[in-house]
Structures are given as structure tokens and as C-alpha cells.
Image: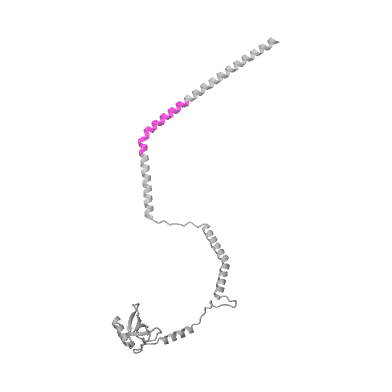
Amino acid sequence: MTQAIISLYSGKTPLCMSINANTTAQQLKQQIYETTSIPVEEQVLRISSGHALADQDLNTGDEFISIKLAGRILGGKGGFGSMLRAQGGRMNAQKTTNFEACRDLQGRRIRTVNDAKKLQEELDAIPEREAEKREKLKKKIEEALKEREPKKYLFDDNKFLEDKEDVVESVKSAVGDALKRQKLTHSPVKKAATASTSVSLFDDDITSDEDEDEEEEGEEEDVEEKDEEQEKVDVKGKGKKRSRK
């Protein structure tokens, strides 16, 4: 008895079947059909070397035999080879212009050399960019400092202007009427007040004049008294001098 280990497709569990020395591949396919319900005509048995077994070609001389079960696939209409040939011709017709992967005589990649050149150009262009930035900033500041002409606005709302004039006139007339009424109602009181104030002012002037006269007279009397005392002192001094002589 020989043990046949059959590997199924689609991740199914392998089968282990016992076959005799006289068992053919067709009989083995029939057993597989009874176990897995895979039609016999769609089964393809291959050994570990990849060789497909014919219906009568089954070597059972070994104790174990490993068989792989595969399915039949319907073929296409062809033309794949001609399509590849046509595509290859188109690819050959396109000439490449990118040689950055190549090397120069010093062994450097052309891509590396080009990158170094670009970097150097960028470094050389930094002062120019800075100068351009400064110029732009300077122009911006000058434009901001320029005196701009004031904008002229045209107000053409005639209705608003008419309403404004009417309001101003009404306010003026109301204020004038109020002042007239106030003058008419308070005129006697004002006259009496003005008379009393004039009298009081006149009285104040008279009293102030009298006070000033009295003060002047008092000052004159004080001066006269001082003069008399001084004369007496002088007379006494002269008498003393004569007695001493």
C-alpha cells in the first residue's frame, strides 16, 4: 500500500489516500471526486517536480507520494505576444533624455553634480533677493509717508438739507418767542431791582467818601500833635544849654 498525500487548492486541508500498486491516475481522480466533489475532467494531478500525471501514469513504487491537485483554466484568444512586441517597439522608439543616473569621468553621479550647481546658484542669488526685499520695503515706506490728497465727498441729498434748514429755523423762532415772553413777564421786577441797586450804590459812595474825610482829618490832627511835642522838646533842650553856660 502506498500513501498518497494530495494538496488541494484554495487553502483546503490536504487529503491522505491509500492506493494499490495497480491504481491508475484516473482511479485516483475518481476517489478525489467522491471526497471533494471536484469533477474529474477539471482535475490536473502534478507531482513535486511539476510534471502532470497522465491517466495511466502513476508510479506507486514508493511508500509515500506527494501529489498537487490543480484545476484547468480556459485559454484566451491569443495575441498577447504580438501586443508585447508592439509595446517593445514603442519603447525603443522613445529616446531618453535623462542621464542623471550616469557618471562623469571623476566617477560622480551627474545628478549630484547638477544638485551642487543648483545649490551654488541659490546661494549666489541670496544677496540679490535681499536687495530686492529692501527695495520693496523702501518703496512701501515712501508710499506710506507721501501726503495724499484729501478725498472730496459730494453730498447731494437735497431733502436732508431742506429738513435741516427747517429744523434750524424752527429752533430759532422758538428761542426768540421764549425770550420775548420772558422779557414781558419780568420787566417790572428788573426795573425795581435796578433802582434799588442804583440807590444802594449811591449810598455806598456817600458813606465811603465820609469815611475817607474822617480818616484824613484824624491823620492831620495826629501830625499837628506830633509837631507840637517836637517844639516843646526843642525848647527844653535850648534852656538846658543856656543854664550850663
* Residue 88 higher or lower than 116, as above or below: below
Where does the N terminus fall, quadrant-wise?
Answer: bottom left
Where does the C terminus fall, quadrant-wise?
Answer: top right
Q: Is residue 203 magenta?
A: yes
Front residue of 42/157: it is 42
Front residue of 1/31: it is 1
Residue 193 position, x and y percent, is 40, 31
Of all residues shown, which one is farthest toward the right?
245
Label total for image? 0
Residue for point 42% across, 87% down: 81
Q: What stretch of residues is rendered in magenta?
A: 181-205
Q: Is residue 146 left or right of residue 44?
A: right
Residue for point 30% across, 84% down: 31
Q: Quadrant of residue 33?
A: bottom left
Q: Is residue 51 left or right of residue 212?
A: left
Residue 22 position, x and y percent, is 33, 88
Front residue of 63/183: it is 63
Q: Quadrant of residue 40?
A: bottom left
Residue 10 position, x and y percent, is 34, 78
Residue for point 46% across, 85% down: 88
Of all residues shown, which one is farthest toward the bottom?
56
Q: Is residue 139 magenta?
A: no
Residue for point 69% across, 10% down: 244
